[in-house]
Image (tube, rainbow, N blue to C red):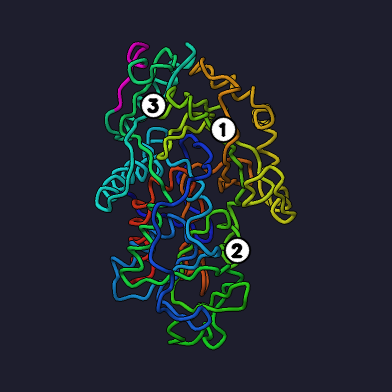
Amino acid sequence: MVPALRYLGTACGWARGGSPRGIPAACGPALGRPRPLCQGSRSASTSSFDVVVIGGGIVGLASARALILRHPTLSIGVLEKEKELAIHQTGHNSGVIHSGIYYKPESLKAKLCVQGASLIYEYCNQKGISYKQCGKLIVAVEQEEIPRLQALYERGLQNGVQGLRLIQQEDIKKKEPYCRGLMAIDCPYTGIVDYRRVALSFAQDFQDAGGSVLTNFEVKDIEMARESPSRSEDGMKYPIVIRNTKGEEVQCQYVVTCAGLYSDRISELSGCSPDPQIVPFRGDYLLLKPEKCYLVKGNIYPVPDSRFPFLGVHFTPRMDGSIWLGPNAVLAFKREGYKPFDFSARDITDVITKSGLIKLVSQNFSYGVSEMYKACFLSATVKHLQKFIPEITVRDILRGPAGVRAQALDQDGNLVDDFVFDGGDGVIGNRILHVRNAPSPAATSSLAISGMIADEVQQRFKL
């Protein structure tokens, strides 16, 4: 059983641990769409709902789906600021169905990822969504990496990851003929899928069950309705007003926020704590040229180094047959800055003045310089890739897509590794549940997270 969410007043409650994962990167085109959004529903200016979910990414859509399937008599709405669903972190995801090996035992990440992977496979089978259970090798290429690899293997066993085994050089060659390594963990349960297609299927389920989706609704204010004084005994049925940048309003009883890159700002709008702050990290991928894709069969990952905050570059097959190489991890100068020169003065000011970024940089200066160098010079990344597949050369790769990871950072400059859920105090805070930090493996864990959120909403709001 997944543990219940924990609350520490207006502060966030979370379990810490595990190794941060790869930055999500751009996804290919969606292979399916839900029926037209808001068909036959009311306009935003007059809409009212029992529960509103802010955020139309995979976690928000999974949560809305779980809520309406559990409470079919409630009116539930999803608000999304873009004109389409799941186009940011979900639509820029590497597509890996993670096994759960990396995360600290007993952490939410470990439990939700292992449970979520099983649920994703089951859901895809039910809906006819294509996926490939292509497996993953975590490969030690140096002798000093072997103790860390063995410790990771033991962690995976503690987490209940299916089918793990340690393999030697000859078995590495059987799985990945062009990969060199001294020892590896074989993770056969790892797979790949188009997560945007999965998210859109969640949206279809939600709408088919009677839910409403409002797109082009960028939340600007969250406040109590003026006609409903907080001191009144009964108040209005829909006491919370959510207003967008165009002045349109939605009223509701309760709110669940799954705002990803803007989770701290949405929390602050509601009067809850802005911490932990979100710091955007861009991850740039390279592409293996089509004629060289035969070099890689499944996912190939390095052994994580606990001295550094991110996992490192790896080889990721895609559903379309392409192979992505990377990503690096560099500070993005805009929360949705998918290009190197995308810039937002507000975003970068917030990062510098409100978060613990300066402490993070000082603690990991050499790592940051190395990531910037690899971002600028392809040869530096290729040199690292050659440790695993020596045949790869600079001529075999192209620059590829990028994504931005919403990484929560505490005031001491520590990356918040685990999922973070919290609420708040006061008339609005008591009616809100915030999903504050849901980086990788949130897509893999989305169905497990949604069940957990539905449990907490039911208990907290007495639905």
Secondary structure at badge 1 equals strand
Queried whether the magenta region covers residue 171, the answer comes back as yes
Secondary structure at badge 2 equals helix
Q: Which quadrant of the structure image shows residue 266? A: bottom right
Q: Residue at x 56, y 62 (%)?
A: 267
Q: Which quadrant of the structure image shows residue 398? A: top right
Queried whether the magenta region covers residue 297, the answer comes back as no
Residue 424 falls left or right of residue 277: left
Disc 1 from disc 2: Cα separation: 37 Å
Q: Residue at x 43, y 20 (%)?
A: 139
Q: Is residue 422 visible?
A: no
Q: Which mark is residue 286?
A: 1
The magenta-colored residue range is 164-172
Badge 3 is on which residue? 297
- Depicted 172 relative to depicted 86: above or below: above
| Amino acid bearing label 3 | Lys
Q: Earlier in the sequence, mark 1 or mark 2?
A: 2
Badge 2 is on which residue? 268
Q: Position of residue 92 (x, y in %)?
A: 51, 47
Disc 2 from disc 3: Cα separation: 45 Å
Q: Which quadrant of the structure image shows residue 385? A: top right
| Amino acid bearing label 1 | Leu
Q: Residue at x 36, y 23 (%)?
A: 185
The number of numbered badges drawn on the structure is 3
